[in-house]
Image: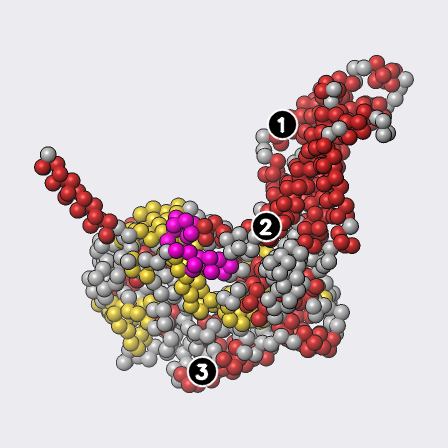
C-alpha cells in the first residue's frame, strides 16, 4: 500500500514537471507554406515556417537591427573591397547531428544561385563564396556591396552531406509541380525539428534540445502545431474556443471581439508592407480596356487622376477599420529612402481628377479590368471593390476580377495584366530592393515584378549602380532622385501600409515582428 | 374558374394561401425593385464607402444617413441589395428550370417514344449524371465556362452561365418523368390512330403525347424552382456565382458570414431570412400543387 502510494506520488511529480515543460503553441494563420525547400519560393508564409527549423547567417529583430545567428560577426575584408568576411558560430549541429561548417555555407549559396531558386535575385551580385577555414567564409561580389548582409536574412543554410545523401541538391521546380526530398523533409540547425507535415492541413514541430542557443533564448514552447485555416470567421472561432492559442492573420473586423474576450489579447505593430495598384503604361495599346488604338494609362494625367480618385481615408476607416496608414509612395516607412513628405503626396480631389481626365481627352471615361488577389493581403478584394466605386466617380468603369494569389501573381510576372493590385514587403530595409523588382525595366533577372512596362535606360543604370556605391550619401541622393521620378510619373497608385495584428492567449509572450515573421524560439509561455 | 376543384382546394388550404401570398409579394417586389429600392446597389459609382457597416435604423457615424436594414461592407443599402439580389435569384431560378424542363422533355420524349438504343443512350447518360451531386456538376460547368469566357464579359455572362450550369444539373428528373409517362401514353389508342393517319413522330410527340403528360412536369418544375434558387445561392455563397459587384442573396450571405463575430449581424440576417421565405414558400406551393394534381390522393 505504502509502496504504491509512493509510486503514485513520484508519478504525479514526474507528470507535473512534464506539465511545466510541455507548452504547445497551437498556431493558425490563413495559408500554409508553399514548400519547405529553403531556396524555392521567396514568400512570407513559406519563410515563416522555415525560420523555425532552418537558420540564415543573420536575422533581424523587431526593430530591424541585425542579430548574429549562424554567423557571429561579419565585416568587409581589409584587403579587398569586394569581399565580406563572415565568422561562423562554432559548435552548431544540424538536426541529424552533423556539424555545421563553412563547407555547408558554400554549398547553400551555390544551391541558392541555381536557376530554379527564387532567392537568386537577392544574391545576384555574389561572384564567389570561399571557405577560408572550418568557421570562416569569404563572400566576393562583382563590386563593393555595402548592403550585402541585408540580403542574407532569409537565406537558409542546409547540410551538404544530408542534401547530397538524399539526392536533393537541385532546388525543386516549383512551377512544374516537382516534389523532392527537401520539400517535405527538413535538416536544419534551427530551434525546432520537423515531426510531421501534411501540406495545407497540419505541421508539427518539436523543440530541438541540442540547439546551440538553447540557454540563450526563452524556447519555452516545446511543441508547435501549425494549422492553416483559410476562412476568417472559422479562424477567429478557433482562437475564441481555445483550439488555437496564436493567430497570425487576424481579421480586422474581429480585433475588438478578441481583445475583449477573457484570456485573449491582440498585439499590433505597423507592418513592413505597402499595398498599391500597378498600371501598364508602357504598351501602345492594352488589352484590358475599351479604348482602341491607344493606352489611356500611358498618359500621366490619367494615372494622376486615378490616384486622386482613391479615397484612402475611407478605405482606412471602413475597409481596414483603422488598421492601415494611407500611403503616398510604395515604400514602407521602415525603408531607407522613405520620406514623410513623399508618403504624404497622395490626396483625394475628385474635381481635380475629373479636370485631369478631361484634359487628357478622357472626359467621358473608359472601362478597364482590374486584377486583384482575394487571399493574400488584408481585405484585398474589399479594397479593390471600393476602388471600383471610387474610380467610377471619375468616369472609369472598372471590371473587377478577384482570384486566388496562386493565379494572380503569375499574371503580373508574365505581363498578363494591365491594372493590378500588389503588395510589397522589404526584408532588406532598403529602396534598392524595391527598385530592383518594381522600377527597373523588366529583364530575365531584374525587374521581374515590374508589370508597368516602365523602362527608362538612365534610371536602370542608376538602379544598377546602387549595389556597388560605397559612398552612402551619394547613394542616398541617387535613391531620392529615383523616387522623385517614380512619384512624378505616378508609376504606381499607393494605397496604404498595412498594420499587423497578432491574436494570442494571455500566457503567450511575443512582440509583433514588422516583417510578419514570428520566430517561436523567442516566445515565452507563462 | 372560381368554382373549379382547383380553386376550392386552394381556398381550403391555409398553407397554400400563405405560401402564395408570400411568393407573390416577394416576386413582385423583385420585379419592381427599381421602383421600390431607395438605392441602386449595382451602380458602384453611387456607393459611398463611408456608409459601410451602418447598423439598421441607426444614423451612420460619418455621413449621418440612415438605412432600413443597415449597409454591408461596401456601404450598400442591404434592403435595396436584397431586392436587386432577389431579381438575380428569381431570374436564374426561373430560367434554369425552364431550360431544364425543355431539355428534359425533349430528351424524355425521344427516349420514351423511340426506345431502343436512343432510350439506352439518353437514360444511361442521365444515370451517370445522377451519380454526381448536382451542385458539383453545376460547379464544374461554371468553372469550365468561366475559363473560356473573356474576362471583360465575365460579369455579364455569369448570370447565363449560372442558368446553364443549374439547368444542366437538373434536367435528369424531368427526362425520367417524361420518359415514364411517354412509355405509358405511346401504346394508347389515340397515339396509334395518329400514327395510322401518317403524322410525323415529332408531331405525335409534341402535339399529342406532350399535353397529356404535362401535369407531373409542372409539379416537379415548381419544386425545382425552389431548389434552383437555393442552388444559385449555394454557388454564390461558395464564391463561384454572381459577381461581387452585383451581389445575389447567396453573395450577400457569404459577405455577411465574415462579420458574424464582430457583431454586424444584419448583413447576413436579412438576406438569409429572405432566401428562407422565398425558397420555403415556393416549395410549399409546389407540395400543395402535387397533392392537388395527384388523382390518387383525391
Q: Quadrant of the N terminus of chain A?
A: top left
Label 2 near label 3: C-beta < 8 Å?
no
- How far across and how far down the image is residue A173, in percent? 44, 53
Image point 54% across, 60% down: which residue?
A: A379
- How far across and how far down the image is residue A450, in percent? 54, 68
Q: Mark 1, chain letter? A: B
Image point 31% across, 60% down: which residue?
A: A523
| Visible residue check, residue B146 | no
Q: Is residue B19 above or below residue A298?
A: above
Q: Do marks 3 and 1 both belong to one polypeptide chain?
A: no
Secondary element at image label 1: helix
What number of labels is visible? 3
Residue range (magenta): A238-262
Q: Quadrant of residue A154?
A: bottom left
Q: Mark 3, chain letter? A: A
Q: Is residue A244 magenta?
A: yes
Residue occupied by mark 2: B268
Q: Earlier in the sequence, mark 1 or mark 2?
A: 1
Q: Quadrant of the C terminus of chain A?
A: bottom left
- How far across and how far down the image is residue A327, in percent? 53, 73
Secondary element at image label 3: helix
Q: Nearer the viewer, residue B153 or A268?
A: A268
Spatial separation of the CA atoms under disc 3 and disc 1? 71 Å
Mark in front: 1 vs 2:
2
- How far across and how far down the image is residue B269, in percent? 60, 49
Q: Do marks 3 and 2 both belong to one polypeptide chain?
A: no
Mark in front: 3 vs 1:
1
Disc 2 crowd rating (10 Å Cα; few below 14, some 14-19, many 20+) is many
Q: Is residue A425 left or right of residue B120?
A: left
Residue occupied by mark 3: A476
Residue occupied by mark 1: B127
Spatial separation of the CA atoms under disc 3 and disc 2? 52 Å
Amino acid at each position: 500500500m505504502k509502496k504504491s502510494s509512493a509510486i503514485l506520488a513520484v508519478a504525479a511529480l514526474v507528470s507535473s514537471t512534464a506539465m511545466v515543460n510541455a507548452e504547445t503553441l497551437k498556431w493558425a494563420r490563413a495559408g500554409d507554406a508553399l514548400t519547405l525547400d529553403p531556396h524555392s519560393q521567396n514568400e512570407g508564409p513559406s519563410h515563416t515556417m522555415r525560420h523555425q527549423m532552418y537558420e540564415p547567417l543573420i536575422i533581424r529583430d523587431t526593430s530591424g537591427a541585425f542579430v548574429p545567428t549562424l554567423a557571429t560577426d561579419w565585416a568587409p575584408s581589409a584587403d579587398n573591397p569586394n569581399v565580406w568576411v563572415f565568422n561562423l558560430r562554432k559548435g552548431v549541429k544540424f538536426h541529424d547531428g552533423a556539424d555545421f561548417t563553412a563547407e555547408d555555407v558554400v554549398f547553400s549559396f551555390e544551391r541558392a544561385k541555381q536557376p530554379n531558386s527564387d532567392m537568386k535575385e537577392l544574391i545576384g551580385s555574389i561572384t564567389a563564396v570561399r571557405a577560408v577555414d572550418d568557421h570562416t567564409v569569404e563572400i566576393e561580389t562583382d563590386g563593393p556591396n555595402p548592403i550585402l548582409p541585408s540580403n542574407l536574412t532569409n537565406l537558409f543554410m542546409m547540410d551538404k552531406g544530408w542534401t547530397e545523401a538524399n539526392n536533393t541538391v537541385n532546388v525543386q521546380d516549383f512551377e512544374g509541380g516537382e516534389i523532392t526530398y527537401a520539400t517535405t523533409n527538413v535538416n536544419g540547425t534551427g530551434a525546432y525539428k520537423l515531426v510531421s507535415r501534411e501540406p495545407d492541413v497540419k505541421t508539427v514541430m518539436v523543440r530541438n534540445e541540442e540547439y546551440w542557443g538553447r540557454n540563450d533564448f526563452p524556447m519555452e514552447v516545446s511543441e508547435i502545431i501549425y494549422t492553416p485555416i483559410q476562412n476568417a470567421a472559422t479562424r477567429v472561432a478557433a482562437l475564441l474556443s481555445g483550439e488555437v492559442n496564436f493567430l497570425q492573420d487576424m481579421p480586422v473586423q474581429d480585433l475588438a471581439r478578441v481583445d475583449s474576450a477573457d484570456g485573449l489579447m491582440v498585439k499590433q505593430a505597423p507592418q513592413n508592407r505597402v499595398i498599391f495598384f500597378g498600371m501598364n503604361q508602357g504598351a501602345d495599346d492594352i488589352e484590358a480596356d475599351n479604348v482602341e488604338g491607344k493606352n489611356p494609362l500611358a498618359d500621366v494625367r490619367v494615372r494622376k487622376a486615378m490616384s486622386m480618385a482613391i479615397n484612402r481615408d475611407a478605405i482606412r476607416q471602413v475597409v481596414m477599420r483603422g488598421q492601415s496608414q494611407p500611403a503616398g509612395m510604395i515604400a514602407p516607412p521602415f525603408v531607407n529612402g522613405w520620406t514623410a513628405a513623399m508618403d504624404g503626396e497622395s490626396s483625394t480631389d475628385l474635381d481635380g481628377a475629373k479636370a485631369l481626365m478631361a484634359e487628357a481627352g478622357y472626359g467621358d471615361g473608359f472601362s478597364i479590368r482590374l486584377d486583384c488577389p482575394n487571399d493574400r493581403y488584408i481585405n484585398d478584394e474589399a479594397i479593390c471593390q471600393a476602388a471600383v466605386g471610387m474610380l467610377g466617380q471619375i468616369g472609369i468603369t472598372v471590371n473587377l476580377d478577384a482570384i486566388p494569389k496562386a493565379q494572380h501573381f503569375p499574371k503580373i510576372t508574365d505581363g498578363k495584366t494591365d491594372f493590378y493590385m500588389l503588395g510589397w514587403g522589404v526584408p532588406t530595409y532598403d529602396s534598392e530592393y524595391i527598385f530592383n523588382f518594381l522600377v527597373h525595366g523588366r529583364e530575365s533577372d531584374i525587374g521581374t515584378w515590374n508589370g508597368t512596362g516602365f523602362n527608362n535606360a538612365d534610371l536602370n543604370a542608376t538602379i544598377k549602380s546602387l549595389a556597388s556605391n560605397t559612398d552612402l550619401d551619394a547613394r542616398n541622393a541617387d535613391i531620392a532622385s529615383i523616387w522623385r521620378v517614380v512619384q512624378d510619373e505616378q508609376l504606381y497608385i499607393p494605397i496604404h501600409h498595412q498594420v499587423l495584428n497578432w491574436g494570442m492567449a494571455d500566457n503567450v509572450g511575443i512582440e509583433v515582428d514588422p516583417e510578419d515573421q514570428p520566430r517561436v524560439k523567442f516566445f515565452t509561455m507563462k | 374558374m372560381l368554382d373549379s376543384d382547383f380553386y376550392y382546394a386552394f381556398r381550403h388550404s391555409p398553407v397554400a394561401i400563405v405560401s402564395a401570398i408570400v411568393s407573390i409579394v416577394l416576386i413582385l417586389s423583385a420585379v419592381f425593385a427599381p421602383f421600390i429600392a431607395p438605392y441602386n446597389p449595382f451602380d458602384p459609382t453611387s456607393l459611398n464607402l463611408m456608409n459601410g457597416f451602418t447598423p439598421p435604423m441607426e444614423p451612420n457615424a460619418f455621413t449621418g444617413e440612415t438605412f432600413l436594414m443597415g449597409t454591408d461592407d461596401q456601404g450598400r443599402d442591404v434592403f435595396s441589395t436584397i431586392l436587386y439580389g432577389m431579381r438575380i435569384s428569381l431570374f436564374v431560378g426561373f430560367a434554369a428550370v425552364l431550360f431544364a424542363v425543355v431539355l428534359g422533355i425533349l430528351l424524355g420524349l425521344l427516349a420514351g417514344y423511340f426506345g431502343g438504343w436512343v432510350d439506352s443512350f439518353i437514360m444511361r447518360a442521365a444515370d451517370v449524371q445522377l451519380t454526381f451531386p448536382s451542385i458539383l456538376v453545376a460547379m464544374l460547368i461554371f468553372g469550365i465556362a468561366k475559363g473560356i469566357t473573356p474576362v471583360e464579359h465575365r460579369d455579364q455572362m455569369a448570370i447565363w452561365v449560372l442558368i446553364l450550369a443549374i439547368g444542366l444539373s437538373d434536367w435528369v428528373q424531368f427526362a425520367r418523368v417524361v420518359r415514364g409517362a411517354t412509355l405509358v401514353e405511346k401504346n394508347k389508342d389515340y397515339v396509334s390512330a395518329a400514327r395510322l393517319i401518317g403524322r410525323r413522330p415529332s408531331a405525335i410527340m409534341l402535339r399529342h403525347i406532350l399535353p397529356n403528360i404535362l401535369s407531373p412536369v409542372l409539379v416537379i418544375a415548381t419544386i425545382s424552382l425552389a431548389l434552383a434558387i437555393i442552388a444559385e445561392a449555394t454557388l454564390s455563397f461558395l464564391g463561384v456565382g454572381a459577381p461581387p459587384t452585383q451581389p445575389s442573396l447567396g453573395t450577400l450571405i457569404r459577405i455577411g458570414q465574415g462579420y458574424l463575430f464582430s457583431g454586424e449581424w444584419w448583413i447576413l440576417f436579412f438576406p438569409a431570412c429572405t432566401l428562407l421565405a422565398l425558397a420555403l414558400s415556393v416549395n410549399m406551393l409546389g407540395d400543395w400543387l402535387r397533392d392537388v394534381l395527384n388523382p390518387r390522393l383525391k
